[in-house]
Amino acid sequence: MATIRKRGQAWQVQIRRDGFPPITKSFRSKADADGWARETERQIENGGGPSGSRTAHKLTVGSLLQRYEAEVTSGKRGQRFEASRIRTFLRSPLANVAAHRLTASMVAAHRDERLKAVKGETVRRELTVLRHCIEIARKEWGVPFIGNPVRQITLPSPSKVRGQRLPQGAEASLMTALSSTRAWYLRPFIILAIETGMRRGELLALQWSDIDFFSRLAVVEVSKNGHGRTVPLTPKAIEILIELPRRGKNVFPVKANAVRLAWERLRKRAGLEEVKMHSMRHEAISRMFEIGLTIPEVSVISGHRTLSCLQRYTHLKPENVAAKLARLSGQTS
């Protein structure tokens, strides 16, 4: 049945029929609105409908996500992770829902079910993908969503801290466990991660041509946030790089999966199974602040473009802050 409303200077028609997506159109006069509504309802009664409505009826949430993966996800740097989130949706009942029938209550039910199995941050990231997929479908693919159901629900709260710095004594335990590893690259990889604060993917992409030994700089061409940066190298980082054998254009000519597996074996031997490799970045950034680097100086090294992002990686030890205050007090007394 058609509903006709006056909206400002226009008359808006909305038609809702079972088996068809909602249809909305605006007209300058009520007569035109009435005429279009009658004709459109007649077409629907006869098994037709306005252009594109029957095609839209066949679309499911799953088919939209598959198109999104092919056209949008495939061009992202983090496509592997986003594709995994899409596959999670495709295995869920939500994938079989007709796109025009998707409601906020359905999305909320999916959210609640997922929260029984995984953490809130995981669910939040999955729903963010669905939300953007629907936005693209509405604005660029002509899919007649009325609003975005994902925007109408409450997403799980973002995690306060993505990770932590290394526990007390963890670095020594890792170095001891490294003495028995067969992965020649793992020790220098971990040390460079702590010395530079570079991400795992950035270290794997680092080439010898990116390093200026004279100026003690390393160029990160493209980082996670899409922006390159130049990383100052500590004397220890330079020492490690000089010692490394040159086995190709990359400093670490190994696959990401090989590093992941070697790391998992290492942390198990070290008794640190809860420690993530990303903790090296937290450790590095926290140490930079503890030795007295300023926020702008640390952001140059870490690549963070906002203070809020940088603060997530800062875990200062109170005793170190107290020692710094004591030194400053001694300088001014």
Image (spheres, rainbow, N blue to C red):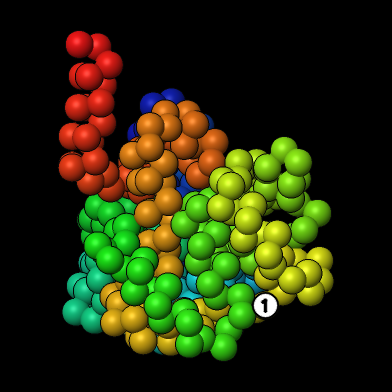
How many residues crowd around disc 1 within 10 Å: few (fewer than 14), some, or many (20 or more)? few
Q: Residue furthest top?
A: 333
User: Looking at the picture, which amino acid does disc 1 mark?
Assistant: Val
- Quarter that holds the N terminus: bottom left
Whether residue 285 sits left or right of residue 183 in the image: it is left
Position in image of residue 164 (x %, y %): 30, 59
Q: Is residue 240 above or below residue 179?
A: above
Number of numbered markers: 1
Which residue is located at x 55 percent, y 75 percent? Answer: 186
Image spot of residue 75 (x, y percent)? 67, 62
Residue drawn where x is 34% and y is 74% of the image? 173
Q: Quadrant of residue 154?
A: bottom left
Left or right, 146 with respect to 167, comes to right
**Residue 34 at least partly seen:** no
Instruction: Name the residue at 49% across, 31% down.
Output: 297
**Secondary structure of the residue carrying numbered label 1:** loop
Q: From the viewer's side, name the closer residue of 294 and 154.
A: 294
The residue that mark 1 highlights is 254
- Please tell me which residue lies in front, 44 or 138: 138
Describe residue 78's horizontal placement relative to residue 267 as left or right: right
Determine whether 301 is above or below 110 in the image: above
Foreground of the two, 222 or 134: 222
Is residue 232 something that shows in the picture? yes
Q: Image quadrant for the C terminus?
A: top left
Image-based side of 287 in relation to 70, left or right:
left
Q: Residue at x 33, y 53 (%)?
A: 151
- x, y percent for residue 284: 42, 51
Residue 149 in picture, x, y percent from top left: 34, 59
The foreground one among 61 and 313 is 313
